[in-house]
Image (cartoon, coloured by chain):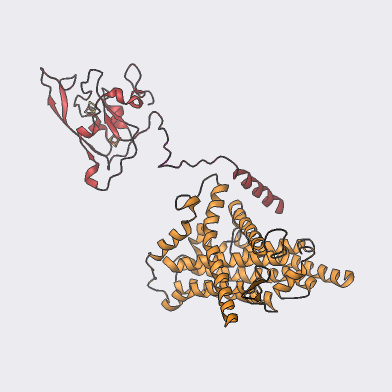
Chain colours: A red, B orange
């Protein structure tokens, strides 16, 4: 028994010379992998038009019903999206969201994606209701990490 | 007057130091654990997390004291003190350094050099368990009760062997006073003469202070928190301080009996004493991080069937050696 205890002690003392695995979080931040499911983003095409066509498939796929979409006809002179319609209201309740990624898989045009951002604490429940303006990116080019999610056929690379 | 001041000073330094050390043991324990588990440990409050024990203390002070409705309130509130006071008092007879000269007087760095020092320590350690049993009984709840019963049974089983393991040293040195024992080790520490005694002492000391692998009284996986399950706030803190104090005291006893107390080359005696005590404490923590907990019947069987015969054997061998070899 003593021999076994000594072996155990030797093992633990060897571990204490290893490199630490702790990430000193607020000081050091880790790069999230492709396919990380964080805060949602609504993407645009290269020409700046919104991808979302207001089809509500994401809303239907969502297991906890936390997406709310209302759609309207595009103005033919100045279209908002490439389809017939676009989402006039697009809200996600991030408190209810379970970050399953089904919305992302359901979307036919690759409009809604779960981004890499995970630091979105708030001090009030109301602030977790993200509206379209909060979710829509200015230019998709600014978010290379989101690009990596789609191949040239516009299919999710990691599903 | 000067005498009184010196005594007061010694008491303040001795007990203050002990309490401070006990508080910092929590920090050391967490750091050592982290070290072994390839983590970092508390490092945010102050440099290297050195202010963490103070922050923890403040936090505990501001917590609410919860008293279970069915508890025996007076005993429930007093029990932690019953554990802490003997744990502190036991330290009084441990010499933590050579004599120094203060205000033109020779002062021995021991709070009270009584000639039955080691018996006194055992008596105090024995009283300490009352605090645990009373606290667990007064909580009027099943987990603490089981923890308290285990603690009492464990203490009885291991105190015998603990005393026996030190008997060898007492026979060689011919004194019960801790100061005398340190003086007896001027040539070489008794660990050389009493290796078996030392081994037995370390094992019993773990059981006596309820440390892993003998931490049955607070086995969290089966008894949630053991005897202090119902305690919160400062009452809980007092229990854990008492536990660390008795660990330090027994480490000091071990250092005094087997490693030559404050003796050592070059560095001042107090520093040597601290180094030895800390080495013991480190071993405590290292062992806790490495070993699983014993089953209860194994613990009892080990105490009565292995440790006790071995310690009796050790006593007899030592007695024979003292008689025949001088
Ligand atoms: S990630 Fe899942 S839960 Fe969250 S919005 Fe998308 S479908 Fe709903
Ligand atoms: S995000 Fe996609 S699935 Fe949801 S409404 Fe817009 S186009 Fe349809």
Give left or right: position of B183 versus A103.
Answer: right
Expressed as whole percent of the image width and height from the top left, the position of residue B5 reads 56, 78
**Which percent across, then down, holds residue B138?**
46, 74
Looking at the image, is A139 positioned above or below residue B188?
above
Q: Position of residue A66 (x, y in %)?
A: 24, 38
Q: Residue at x 48, y 51 (%)?
A: B47
Tell me the quarter of the image containing the C terminus of chain B: bottom right
Magenta run includes residue B233: no
User: Is residue B231 shown to the viewer in this render?
Assistant: no
Depth check, front residue: B156 or B187: B187
Image quarter for ligand 1 equals: top left
Residue under the point 50% across and 74% down: B81
Q: Where are the magenta residues, as a range?
A: A24-30
Q: Observer-nearest residue: A153 or B58?
A: B58
Q: Quadrant of residue B211?
A: bottom right
**Is residue A75 toward the left or the right of residue B45 in the image?**
left
Q: Is residue A129 visible?
A: yes
């Amino acid at each position: 028994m003593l021999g076994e205890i000594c072996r155990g002690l030797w093992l633990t003392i060897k571990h204490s010379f290893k490199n630490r695995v702790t990430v000193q979080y607020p000081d050091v931040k880790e790069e999230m992998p492709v396919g990380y499911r964080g805060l949602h983003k609504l993407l645009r095409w290269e020409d700046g038009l919104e991808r979302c066509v207001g089809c509500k498939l994401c809303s239907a796929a969502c297991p906890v019903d936390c997406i709310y979409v209302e759609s309207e006809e595009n103005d033919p002179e100045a279209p908002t999206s490439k389809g017939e319609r676009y989402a006039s209201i697009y809200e996600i309740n991030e408190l209810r969201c379970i970050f399953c990624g089904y919305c992302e898989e359901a979307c036919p045009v690759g409009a809604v994606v779960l981004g890499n951002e995970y630091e979105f604490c708030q001090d009030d429940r109301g602030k977790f209701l993200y509206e379209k303006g909060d979710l829509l990116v200015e230019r998709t080019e600014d978010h290379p990490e989101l690009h990596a999610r789609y191949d040239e056929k516009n299919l999710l690379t990691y599903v | 007057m000067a005498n009184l001041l010196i005594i007061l000073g010694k008491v303040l330094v001795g007990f203050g130091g002990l309490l401070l050390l006990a508080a910092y043991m929590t920090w050391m324990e967490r750091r050592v654990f982290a070290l072994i588990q390839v983590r970092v440990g508390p490092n945010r409050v102050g440099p290297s997390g050195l202010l963490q024990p103070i922050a923890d203390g403040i936090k505990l002070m501001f917590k609410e004291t919860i008293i279970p409705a069915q508890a025996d309130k007076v005993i429930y509130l007093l029990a932690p003190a019953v554990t802490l006071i003997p744990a502190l008092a036991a330290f009084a007879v441990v010499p933590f350094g050579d004599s120094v000269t203060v205000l033109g007087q020779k002062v021995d760095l021991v709070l009270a050099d009584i000639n039955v020092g080691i018996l006194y320590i055992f008596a105090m350690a024995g009283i300490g368990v009352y605090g645990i049993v009373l606290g667990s009984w007064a909580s009027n709840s099943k987990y603490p009760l089981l923890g308290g019963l285990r603690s009492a049974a464990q203490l009885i089983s291991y105190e015998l062997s603990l005393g026996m393991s030190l008997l060898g040293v007492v026979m060689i040195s011919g004194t019960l006073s801790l100061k005398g024992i340190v003086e007896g080790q001027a040539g070489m520490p008794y660990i050389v003469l009493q290796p078996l005694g030392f081994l037995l002492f370390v094992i019993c000391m773990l059981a006596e202070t309820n440390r892993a692998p003998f931490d049955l009284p607070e086995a969290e996986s089966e008894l949630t928190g053991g005897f202090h399950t119902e305690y919160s706030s400062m009452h809980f803190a007092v229990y854990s301080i008492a536990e660390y104090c008795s660990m330090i005291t027994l480490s000091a006893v071990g250092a005094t009996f087997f490693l030559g107390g404050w003796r050592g080359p070059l560095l001042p005696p107090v520093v040597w004493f601290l180094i030895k005590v800390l080495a013991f404490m480190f071993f405590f923590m290292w062992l806790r991080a490495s070993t699983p907990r014993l089953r209860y019947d194994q613990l009892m069987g080990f105490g009565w069937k292995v440790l006790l015969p071995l310690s009796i054997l050790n006593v007899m061998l030592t007695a024979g050696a003292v008689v025949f070899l001088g």
